[in-house]
Amino acid sequence: MLTKQLGAFLAAVGGLLFVLLNAGGLPAPWPWLLRGLGALAFAWALFRLSQPGTLPSGRRPDARSWRTYLLSVGLMTLAIPLGARALNLSGHGRYTVLWVVLVVGLHFFPFASAFGAPVFRSVAAGLVAAALLGAGLTALGLPWGPAAGAVAAGFVLLAYSGGLGQPKSLLS
């Protein structure tokens, strides 16, 4: 189904952007190393997505599934700017990128049952964990905590677009 490939491609693009845009906030030599690894992971994901039959089949979405999808995406679209504004107004703007990662992660949870694809639970959990990791590092006073969380989130998205954790994978 073309929509699955498009979804996996968008996840790979989002993952690459998380890595490229946030790796610069990490201490040397990590920015260039992680950007290079991100580019390689993106190339792998593109290769994988070009191969027929590499995505799990799931079930054909019905009207209820699409409503779940639209509600989840709609809530995410509202939550990101509202939460970012609240963080900035409260003097915690450094957590904004982690808020984005958290909300993007949470928006994937309903997809697992809506689309009959349990892989969405793993993606969601990985993104939530990345956000919490970054928040924990930031709370400990590490100035690169937000960047670390965002880069970790990027690699979560790239890993799943590349087939890691999915039942049918070119890695197995």
Image (cartoon, rainbow, N blue to C red):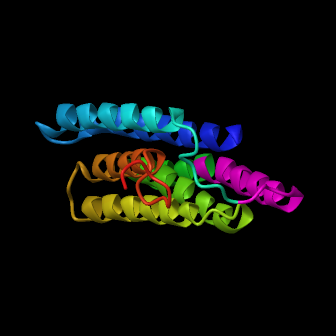
- Which residue is rendered at x = 81% and y = 54% of the image? 66
* Residue 4 image point, x, y percent: 65, 44
User: Picture quarter containing residue 34?
Assistant: top left
- Look at the image and say whether residue 64 sits in the magenta stretch: yes
Q: In this orientation, does residue 29 appear? A: yes
Query: Closer to the camera, 153 or 28?
Result: 153
Mark count: 0
Q: Quadrant of the C terminus?
A: bottom left
Q: Main secondary structure of the magenta part?
A: helix
Query: Closer to the camera, 126 or 98?
Result: 126
* Residue 147 image point, x, y percent: 30, 46
Q: Which residues are magenta?
A: 59-80
Query: Image check: 141 left or right of 8?
Result: left
User: Picture quarter containing residue 103?
Assistant: bottom right
- Which residue is rendered at x = 70% and y = 42% of the image? 1
Query: Closer to the camera, 151 or 158?
Result: 158
Query: Image check: 21 left or right of 139?
Result: right
- Which residue is rendered at x = 51% and y = 36% of the image? 51
Vertical order, 47 against 80 (above or below): above
* Residue 79 image point, x, y percent: 63, 54
- Look at the image and say whether residue 37 sits in the magenta stretch: no
Q: In this orientation, does residue 93 appear? A: no
